[in-house]
Amino acid sequence: MSGRVLTRWLVVVVLLACVALNSAAAQERIGIAVGETPPAVTLEDLDGNPVDLGDYIGRRPVLLEFWATWCPLCEGLMPTLEAAYAEYADEVEFLIVAVAVNQSQRRVRRHLESHTLPGRVLWDGEGRAVRAFQAPSTSYVVVLDAEGKVVYTGLGEGQDIEAALAKAVR
C-alpha cells in the first residue's frame, strides 16, 4: 500500500472515530482523564521555534484544540471556539495544536493567511501533545484549570465549550 493511500485511509479512520465518539457518553471517556495533570511537552510555533506547554499549564486556565486544516469537525466547532474566545480570552489561554497528519507547517501557514483562528497556533510535528493528552482525533478539546488539571475533554462540533471554560475559571 502506497504512503498516499495509507494516509487517506488514516484520515477516513480518524473521521469515522470522530463520528463514533461524538456522543455525550463517549465524550466523558475520551482522551486524558478529567482530574489528571498532563505532562508539559515542547511543541513548535509555525516558524519552528520551541514552545514549552509548561509555560502555560498551571499558570492560568488553558484550552487546547487538536486541529487540522482538512478537518470538517474542526471547522464546525470554530464558531463555538470563536464565541468562547471573545468571552474568555482575558482569562484563558487558547492554544490550537496543529497535528501533523496529512498537513505540513507550510500548509497550516498558508491556511492562516485566509483564516483567523482563536488562539495561538502550535505545531505538533512529532505527536508529543497528541500522546500527552491522549488525543483520539482532531476536533478534540481539552480544558485545564489554573492548577493544570483537566476539567473537560470533548470531541466534535457539538461541544459546550463555554460551560467547560466556566468550570475552569471558577
Image (cartoon, rainbow, N blue to C red):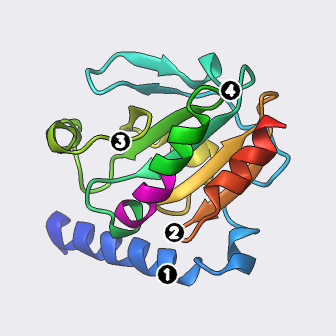
Along the line of sight, which residue is nearer the eye, 13 or 58? Answer: 58
Tag 4 and tag 3, C-beta contact below 8 Å: no
Q: Is residue 10 among the parts visible in the rendering?
A: yes
Residue 152, position as x, y percentages in the image: 73, 53
Q: Which mark is residue 57?
A: 4
Residue range corresponding to the magenta coloring? 75-81
What kind of residue is marked 1? Val
155 on left or right of 149: left
79 on left or right of 169: left
**Residue 78: within the magenta?**
yes
Tell me the element at label 1.
helix
C-alpha distance separating marks 4 and 2: 23 Å
* Residue at horizontal 46 percent and vertical 43 percent from the top: 127
Tell me the element at label 3.
loop
Tell me the residue that label 3 is attached to: 117
C-alpha distance separating marks 1 and 4: 29 Å
Residue 156, position as x, y percentages in the image: 51, 68
132 on left or right of 51: right
3 or 2: mark nearer the eye: 3
Tell me the residue that label 2 is attached to: 156
Residue 137, position as x, y percentages in the image: 49, 63
Tell me the element at label 4.
loop
C-alpha distance separating marks 4 and 3: 20 Å
Tag 2 and tag 1, C-beta contact below 8 Å: yes
Indicate which disc, 3 or 2, sits on the residue closer to the N terminus. Answer: 3
